[in-house]
Amino acid sequence: MSIINSSHPDEEILVAYIESTLRTGNSEMVRKHVATCDDCFLRLAVLKKNMNKENVTPPEKTPPELIRQAKDLVPVEEIRDTRKAITDKSSSSIKSILQHKIRNLFAPVPRWGYAVVFGLVVLCVILVFRTPAVKNISMGDQLVVSSAGPLGFVDGHETRPFTGMRVALSDDQKNIIFTWPDVPAALYYDIILSYGESTRRLTPLPGINTTSFIVSRNDIEMAQYYIWAIQGKLQNGDYFEAKAKFLIHE
């Protein structure tokens, strides 16, 4: 008698097929039917999936007796020796890496390396200890004397040789010192500083024998060409002027 009622096996037959509790002939009959029937194949797949979920059980805790037997199989001393070997190997690897890094750090430097280091040291010294310098530029080395005419108008000019106008830095590099030769019969001196469109008259110097003047370095722009002039009046009423240039640079 066929176990498949009507045209399809019922759920009980499919469950028995999954659990392999059918006789060999009946099991073969179900297998052939499911292979040709899409509906029964789908029913069989759903039953297998649901039965697998129901049969899942949580893992049991390892029995203490099994743990004891495992320890008996592997002596504690052997476990300790294995752990120590692993630790020693790791320490040896770390030590080897550190020694390699240290050797590279103190490895001999090629000759060109010394040259590069020396050049960098010299450059640093120059940048740290460099001091500004003054460049003096002549503008003819002449003293122009203008004769005073009626009502203050200039009546004529006279040119005389005049050398020695100089600008220098003080020893502490904080001040600019202007010096020039004495102009005979001068009543006073003024210093005129000009660069670009800026002109500044410095405080007149008292006395006829004073031939130097000091200005704070902060009042002078670096890398800027200045024209400086000394002006004054002679005892006979004539006026005089001499000019020169200077530049302060590093």
Image (cartoon, rainbow, N blue to C red):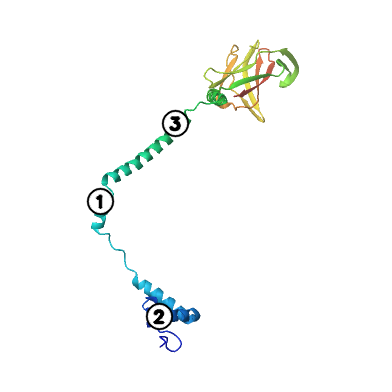
Amino acid residing under circle 3: Ile
Which amino acid type is shown beneath numbered disc 2? Leu
User: Marks 1 and 2, how far apart in space?
Assistant: 48 Å
Report the mark closest to the observer, 1 or 3.
1
Q: Relative to residue 44, is residue 237 drawn left or right?
A: right
Amino acid type of the residue that numbered disc 1 sits on in the rendered structure: Asp
Q: Report, in whole angstroms, how far the alpha carbon at label 1 lies from the one at label 3.
A: 46 Å
Q: Which secondary structure lies at badge 3?
A: helix
Rendering quarter of residue 133: top right
Other residues around mark 1 within 10 Å, as few (<14) / some (14–19) / many (≥20):
few
Q: Are marks 3 and 2 in contact (CB under 8 Å)?
A: no
Which numbered disc flags the more N-terminal residue, 3 or 2?
Answer: 2
Residue under the point 45% across and 33% down: 100
Residue 188 figure quarter: top right
Rounded to the nearest angstrom, the CA distance separating label 3 from label 2 is 75 Å
Name the quarter where the N terminus is drawn.
Answer: bottom left
Extreme residue in the right direction: 156
Mark 3 against mark 2, which lies toward the viewer?
2
Q: Residues within 10 Å of mark 2 (few under 14, many from 20)?
A: many
The residue pinned by badge 3 equals 102
Mark toward the start of the polypeptide (1 vs 2)? 2
Residues marked 1 and 3 touching at CB (< 8 Å) = no
Number of numbered discs present? 3
Q: Position of residue 166 (x, y in %)?
A: 63, 16
Q: Helix, strand, or loop for circle 1?
A: helix
Query: Between 179 and 130, which is closer to the camera in this rendering?
Result: 130
Per the image, the residue denoted by label 2 is: 14
Q: Position of residue 171 (x, y in %)?
A: 53, 17
Q: Quadrant of residue 152?
A: top right
SS under mark 2: helix
- Left or right of 236: which side holds 72? left
Which residue is identified by label 1? 72
